[in-house]
Amino acid sequence: MIRKMISERFAGLALIVIFSLTILFHLAVIAGLVPMDMIWGGRLKTQGELYVFESISIVLNAFMLWIVTIRMNYFKFSVNPKVIRVVLWLMFLLFLVNTLSNLMAFNNLETYIFTPITFILALLSFRLAIKG
C-alpha cells in the first residue's frame, strides 16, 4: 500500500532534504540561535551536554544522509545493498521510537513540531527499506 502512496524517488529526495535541514538546525542550536530548552525534550542542563548531544546528532544525520544517497544511487560506494537495507530498517525503528519520545517531551513546541517530522521520517525510511 505504501508503495503506491510514496514513490522511492520521493522518499529519497524528501529524506535528503529533511536530513540536510536537520543538520542546519543542529548547527543553529550549537550557534545559540535556538533556545536550549526547545531541544532534547528540555532535559539538557549544561552547554557541555548541548555540544555533546548536538555533535552526535549531526554525525548521525550525516550518516543517514549518506545511507540514503547510496540507496538512491546518487553516489557509487561498494556497500552491500543488504547492509543499506538493514540500516534503513534501523532508521525506521529509531524514528518510530523518537516519535513516541517526542510525544512525552516537556516542551509543547517540540511535541507539536517534531512529532510529525519524526513520524514522516519513519514512513519515508520504511518506504526505502522495503523492496520495490
Image (cartoon, helix red, strand yellow):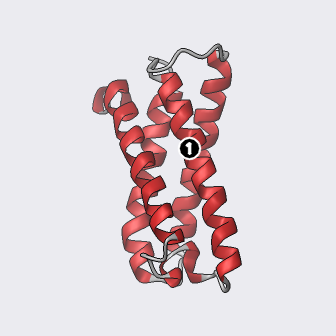
- The foreground one among 28 and 87 is 28
Residue extending farthest to the front is 31
> Residue 97 appears at what percent x and percent y?
60, 57
Residue occupying the point 67% across, 84% down: 46
Where on the picture, by quarter, is residue 67?
Answer: top right
Residue occupying the point 53% across, 23% down: 70
- The foreground one among 10 and 126 is 10
What is the three-letter code of the residue carrying label 1? Ala
Above or below, comparing residue 101 to residue 122 in the picture: below
Which of the image's four quarters has the N terminus?
Answer: top left
Above or below, comparing residue 112 to residue 54 in the picture: below
Above or below, comparing residue 123 to residue 28 in the picture: above
Q: Is residue 48 left or right of residue 34?
A: right
Which of the image's four quarters has the C terminus?
Answer: top left
Q: Residues within 10 Å of mark 1 (few under 14, many from 20)?
A: some
Where on the picture, by quarter, is residue 86?
Answer: top right
Q: Is residue 116 left or right of residue 92?
A: left
Q: Is residue 114 left or right of residue 101?
A: left
Residue occupying the point 48% across, 28% down: 69
Residue occupying the point 51% across, 38% down: 65
> Residue 63 appears at what percent x and percent y?
60, 40
> Residue 8 appears at what percent x and percent y?
37, 25
Q: Secondary structure at mark 1?
A: helix
- The foreground one among 44 and 3 is 44
Counting every numbered tag in the picture gives: 1
Residue topped by disc 1: 62
